[in-house]
């Protein structure tokens, strides 16, 4: 009877030791990455991750790989939309995460020697010029693009599809 209790105790201790070693391995080797978003710029700050896998699809059918081996903190610009990402260190892939880059429509007016409209948003805009209620012109501006205009009339902008 005493031998059975010792045998059971050895089995329980072996199982506990196995769990402790397994959890320690996962804790040490699991890739940890933080993401911060500012406008359309995304920054990854990584601990124990070599690669960030990023995709517009949740099944990662069109993945892009960002190599963090050379740069630990990397920041880059993305188009508006939903993105899925997960860190990897070559041993373990992290959980899938999601972030959204929001569309920002913005139009600025620069008045120097010439007046210009400037797209200060992060999406393409369609600008129409109206004079006395009638559309008399149209301009398509990419982000950060500008166009000289007459400083007369009414200009209306909306996101271009």
Image (cartoon, rainbow, N blue to C red):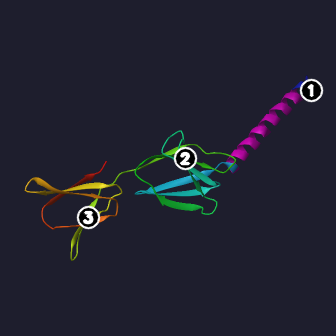
| Residue placed under numbered mark 2 in the picture | 63
Quadrant location of the N terminus in the rendered image: top right
160 or 72, which lies in front? 160
In the rendering, which numbered label is found on residue 108?
3
Give the mark nearest the N terminus, 3 or 1. 1
Residue 137, how many percent across, how many down? 17, 57
Residue identified by numbered label 1:
3
Name the residue at 7% across, 56% down: 132
16 or 123, nearer to the observer: 123
Q: Kindly state the secondary structure of the residue where label 3 is placed.
A: strand
Where residue 11 appears, as percent x and y from the top left, is 83, 31
Find the magenta span and give its range: 5-28
Identify the element where label 1 is drawn: helix
Q: How crowded is mark 3: few (under 14 residues within 10 Å), some or many (20 or more)?
A: few
x and y percent of residue 141 in the render? 30, 59
- In this rendering, the answer to whether 31 lies above or below 110 is above
| C-alpha span from label 3 to label 2 | 35 Å
> Is residue 6 within the magenta segment?
yes
- Label 2 Cα neighbours within 10 Å, binned few <14 / some 14-19 / many ≥20: some
Determine which quarter of the picture holds residue 70: bottom right
């Amino acid at each position: 009877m005493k031998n059975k209790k010792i045998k059971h105790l050895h089995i329980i201790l072996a199982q506990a030791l196995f769990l402790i070693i397994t959890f320690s391995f996962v804790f040490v080797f699991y890739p940890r990455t933080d993401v911060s978003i500012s406008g359309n710029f995304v920054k990854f700050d990584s601990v124990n991750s070599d690669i960030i896998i990023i995709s517009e699809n949740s099944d990662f059918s069109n993945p892009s790989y960002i190599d963090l081996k050379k740069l630990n903190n990397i920041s880059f610009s993305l188009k508006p939309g939903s993105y899925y990402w997960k860190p990897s260190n070559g041993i373990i892939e992290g959980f899938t995460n999601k972030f959204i880059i929001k569309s920002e429509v913005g139009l600025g007016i620069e008045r120097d020697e010439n007046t210009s409209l400037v797209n200060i948003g992060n999406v393409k805009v369609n600008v129409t010029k109206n004079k006395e209620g009638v559309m008399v012109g149209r301009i398509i501006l990419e982000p950060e693009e500008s166009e000289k205009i007459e400083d007369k009339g009414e200009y209306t902008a909306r996101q271009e599809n």
